[in-house]
Amino acid sequence: MKNTARKGFLFLVIALIAVSGVFAQRVGDTVTVSGQQFRVQEYRDGRMVLQLVPSLDGVWVAEGGWTITINGNTAVFTQLGTASGRTQDAINKGYMGVGVQAFRNFRSTGNLTWSGQMLNISYNSNSPNVAIGTAWANTTITMNSDGQSFRDDPAGRTWTRRQ
């Protein structure tokens, strides 16, 4: 009987430790499960309800074959697509190329939105097809709920995740 009581007490202590570890996460906290990040949405019936935290990390392709690789808060061109006019002039002058930053300073602003900056080609309005440099412009990224594509605004390009 004494041994059974000791086992029951030990089970109760282990259960309390396990429960306290689970409830140490507060609503809004981020947890990692099997390498994926989730946000604690709520507790329901003693269980955590998690929502996948979408990530921009990966390889993305836009129309014309433009390809970027995002890692953290930065994206670089990994393949240049079809270009003409001032974009082609910027490539010829070395303002744009493989390995050059395309986006920077990504910061999550919501569940599926980020703000940041995108590389823009500077030009003189009298010669719109002649690149005179580059500048950073503010952009907003909005990801589709399936996490497989996003749109950058104000440019209006859609980028699709490469599998």
Image (cartoon, rainbow, N blue to C red):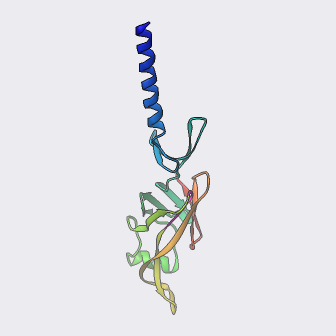
Give the left or right position of residue 139, taking residue 93 as reference.
right
**93 or 21, which is in the foreground?**
21
Residue at the image position 40 percent from the left and 65 percent from the top: 98
Residue reaching furthest to the bottom? 126
- Percent position (x, y) of residue 88? 47, 76
Magenta span: 111-115
Residue reaching furthest to the top? 1
- Residue 145 sits above or below residue 153 on the image: above
Give the left or right position of residue 105, taking residue 125 as reference.
left
- Looking at the rendered image, the quarter that the N terminus falls into is top left
- Residue 112 sits above or below residue 117 on the image: above
- Percent position (x, y) of residue 123? 47, 85
Residue at the image position 48 percent from the left and 33 percent from the top: 19
**15 or 99, which is in the foreground?**
15
Residue 135 figure quarter:
bottom left
- Majority secondary structure in the magenta region: strand
Q: Does the magenta segment cover residue 114?
A: yes
- Percent position (x, y) of residue 127? 50, 90
- Percent position (x, y) of residue 46? 57, 35
**58 or 63, which is in the foreground?**
58
Residue 14 figure quarter:
top left
Q: How many marks?
A: 0
Residue 136 figure quarter:
bottom left
- Residue 104 sits above or below residue 130 on the image: above
Q: Does the magenta segment cover residue 120?
A: no
- Residue 6 sits above or below residue 146 on the image: above
